[in-house]
């Protein structure tokens, strides 16, 4: 490696290091954090208004109903064409497996999931960012009563997949809700972002279900 080339590499490395330190200092500035939260609140309010307008549009409502009917028709057709299965006599279901089987979603819960699934990650929004797609995080497990209502939409890096090291260095709040090794878990996730209950209220508000969330959180 020539001396000139090595010097150029060192210069680039120093520039990258300065840029990283500058970004870290900016993110740790209380005024900057507050401005980002204010911007996130503003975006949330705009998103809520936009969502309400969309949901009040008769044409949009009709399209949702048509999609639901089409999906139900496909499922019915698949069930009709599915070959019958014969059960072997004398076999009994395991009690332990039945006890831990995920509770089936109601029709309203399915609609709720569809609506929340269209939102960006609510944890990223706290920091003025927007990431898609999202997956649904259960706040109270998958078997308890109304477990499919206590949910929030999270991106993969906030849900159960640790972000790359370089991303975490720039965005210290990118902590997964489900711990992977020493990274993540509920306490760390809420300390870096917000309480799950607050995120749930934000998500429900964005789809026009704020009062519903308040009733659930009061239980």
Image: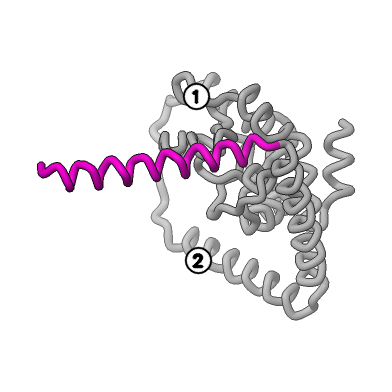
Viewed as shown, does residue 12 lie left or right of 54?
left
Q: Is residue 12 magenta?
A: yes
Q: Which residue is mark 2?
A: 77
x and y percentages locating residue 198 in the rendered image: 78, 38
Res 190 quadrant in image? top right
Residue drawn at x 73%, y 36% is 30
Residue drawn at x 56%, y 52% is 131
Residue drawn at x 10%, y 42% is 1
Residue 115 or 25: which is nearer the viewer?
A: 25
Q: Which residue is mark 1?
A: 183
Instruction: Identify the mark at residue 90; answer none if there is no mark.
Output: none
x and y percentages locating residue 56 in the rendered image: 82, 72
Task: Tell me the mark number nearer the camera, choosing from 2 and 1.
Answer: 1
Quadrant into which the C terminus falls:
top right
Res 16 quadrant in image? top left
Q: Is residue 127 above or below residue 82?
A: above
Q: Which residues are magenta?
A: 1-29
Q: Is residue 123 magenta?
A: no
Viewed as shown, does residue 117 lie left or right of 85?
right
Which residue is farthest bottom? 59
Q: Secondary structure at mark 2?
A: helix
- Please say if the residues under marks 2 and 1 sit with CB atoms less than 8 Å apart: no
Which residue is farthest left? 1
Across the whole image, how many numbered discs are drawn on residues? 2
Viewed as shown, does residue 1 lie left or right of 32?
left
Residue 92 or 153: which is nearer the viewer?
A: 153
x and y percentages locating residue 43 in the rendered image: 74, 58
Residue drawn at x 50%, y 37% is 21
């Amino acid at each position: 490696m020539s001396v000139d080339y090595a010097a150029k590499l060192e210069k680039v490395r120093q520039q990258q290091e300065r840029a990283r330190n500058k970004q870290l200092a900016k993110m740790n500035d209380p005024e900057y954090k507050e401005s980002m939260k204010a911007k996130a609140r503003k975006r949330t309010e705009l998103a809520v208004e936009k969502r309400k307008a969309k949901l009040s549009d008769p044409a949009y409502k009709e399209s949702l109903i048509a999609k639901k009917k089409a999906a139900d028709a496909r499922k019915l057709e698949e069930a009709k064409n599915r070959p019958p299965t014969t059960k072997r006599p004398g076999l009994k279901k395991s009690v332990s497996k039945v006890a831990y089987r995920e509770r089936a979603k109601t029709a309203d819960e399915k609609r709720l999931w569809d609506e929340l699934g269209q939102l960006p990650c609510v944890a990223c929004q706290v920091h003025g960012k927007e990431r898609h797609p999202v997956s649904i995080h259960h706040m109270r497990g998958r078997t308890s009563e109304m477990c499919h209502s206590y949910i929030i939409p999270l991106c993969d890096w906030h849900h159960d997949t640790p972000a790359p090291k370089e991303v975490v260095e720039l965005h210290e709040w990118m902590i997964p809700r489900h711990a992977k090794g020493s990274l993540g878990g509920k306490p760390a996730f809420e300390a870096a972002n917000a309480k799950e209950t607050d995120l749930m209220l934000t998500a429900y508000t964005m789809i026009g279900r704020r009062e519903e969330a308040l009733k659930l959180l009061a239980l």
